[in-house]
């Protein structure tokens, strides 16, 4: 029987890895095989996750349906494509974002990563950061590198330790860049993720880009209670609150908390969300007129440079 890593299952279900883990841990919805500390999923696991997602998209809550048999989920759900065979793993491919120089350096980093040459990896990334402006570093180095690492993980070429080292180190580099940027005088944006939401990398990248575009930035980090986000936003008199979230299906109270936050912000203070796009989440946010930013390109269009 074929088994697949979590990133591959995430790609073919539309669920984030954090969501899949939450469904397993909190609701025992699936029981993947484990090998060398890594979760491996069967075709049956894939089918059940698709069925669960179909029922969620139809308006059910994961807490209500996690223990239902597949036959009941089929009746509840909207998906008619779950019988399709799982596609073959994709071959590694260079990203279109980077140029020849970045492509070569990224290839070198991937080779060093496979040999656990973490010190050399650190030096290469520092070199690339020093030669790039922050926005270019994120778009031409960080995002393509993470994309390639994700593909390598799908092929089980990287371990969890290797992936975690790289993402943590890139986070440190991006965080350190804040210290070298000039002070800005534009409107203030507050960045955070609410309680239970720990998908921070995109939020950190967006915060850095906002500084390069002339905005003052207040970065609270991840897993912040919504009342604390509200207090900070109102006390600091920000003009916009940006939250990064995981899919709504991992947090039954997300929409309620976000809508309450919007209502209690001071007049004139905006609120927008970003993170893994989920039709259910986007539709509910539209009802409250809360913008959803799919990626950094959309973020930059939403926040033009301050003149």
Image: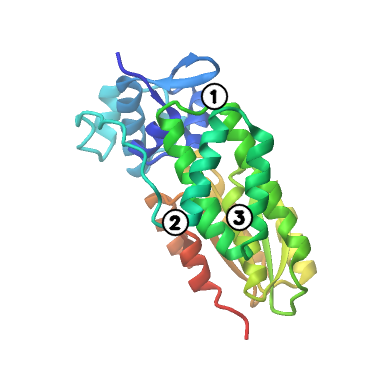
Q: Earlier in the sequence, mark 2 or mark 1?
A: 1
In the rendered structure, the answer to whether residue 90 lies left or right of residue 194 reads left
| Residue at the image position 30 percent from the left and 29 percent from the top | 73
In the rendered structure, the answer to whether residue 241 lies left or right of residue 5 reads right
Within 10 angstroms of label 3, few (less than 14), some, or many (20 or more) residues? many
Q: Position of residue 14 (x, y in %)?
A: 37, 41
Report the disc number at residue 100.
2
Mark 2 falls on what kind of element?
A: helix
Q: Quadrant of residue 112?
A: top right
Q: Position of residue 248 (x, y in %)?
A: 48, 45
Q: Position of residue 130 (x, y in %)?
A: 68, 59
In the rendered structure, the answer to whether residue 297 lies left or right of residue 227 reads left
Q: Position of residue 143 (x, y in %)?
A: 51, 52
User: Which mark's residue is nearer the viewer, 1 or 3?
Assistant: 3
The alpha-carbon separation of the residues under discs 2 and 1 comes to 43 Å
The alpha-carbon separation of the residues under discs 3 and 2 comes to 28 Å
The residue wearing badge 1 is: 25
The alpha-carbon separation of the residues under discs 1 and 3 comes to 25 Å
Camera-nearest residue between 237 and 189: 189
Mark 1 falls on what kind of element?
A: helix
Q: Quadrant of residue 304?
A: bottom right
Q: Quadrant of the C terminus?
A: bottom right
Camera-nearest residue between 189 and 59: 189
Report the disc number at residue 203.
3
| Residue at the image position 69 percent from the left and 36 percent from the top | 119
Does residue 24 lie above or below 268 as drawn? above
| Residue at the image position 40 percent from the left and 51 percent from the top | 95
């Amino acid at each position: 029987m074929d088994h697949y890593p979590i990133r591959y299952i995430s790609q073919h279900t539309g669920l984030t890895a954090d969501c899949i883990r939450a469904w397993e841990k909190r609701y025992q919805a699936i029981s993947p095989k484990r090998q060398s500390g890594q979760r491996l999923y069967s075709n049956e696991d894939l089918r059940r996750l698709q069925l669960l997602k179909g029922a969620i998209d139809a308006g059910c809550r994961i807490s209500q349906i996690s223990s239902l048999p597949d036959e009941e989920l089929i009746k509840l759900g909207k998906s008619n494509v779950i019988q399709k065979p799982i596609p073959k793993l994709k071959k590694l491919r260079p990203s279109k974002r980077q140029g020849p120089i970045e492509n070569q350096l990224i290839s070198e980093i991937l080779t060093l990563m496979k040999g656990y040459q973490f010190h050399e990896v650190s030096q290469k990334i520092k070199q690339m950061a020093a030669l790039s402006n922050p926005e270019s570093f994120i778009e031409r180095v960080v995002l393509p590198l993470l994309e390639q690492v994700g593909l390598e993980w799908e092929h089980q070429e990287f371990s969890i330790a290797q992936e975690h080292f790289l993402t943590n180190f890139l986070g440190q580099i991006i965080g350190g860049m804040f210290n070298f940027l000039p002070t800005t005088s534009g409107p203030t944006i507050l960045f955070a993720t609410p309680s239970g939401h720990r998908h921070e990398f995109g939020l950190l990248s967006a915060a850095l880009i906002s500084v390069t575009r002339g905005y003052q930035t207040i970065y609270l980090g991840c897993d912040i209670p919504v009342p604390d986000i509200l207090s900070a936003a109102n006390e600091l008199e920000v003009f916009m609150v940006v939250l990064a979230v995981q899919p709504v299906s991992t947090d039954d109270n997300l929409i309620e908390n976000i809508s309450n936050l919007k209502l209690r912000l001071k007049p004139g203070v905006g609120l927008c969300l970003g993170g893994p796009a989920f039709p259910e989440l986007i539709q509910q946010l539209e009802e409250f007129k809360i913008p959803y930013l799919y990626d950094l390109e959309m973020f930059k269009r939403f926040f033009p440079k301050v003149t």
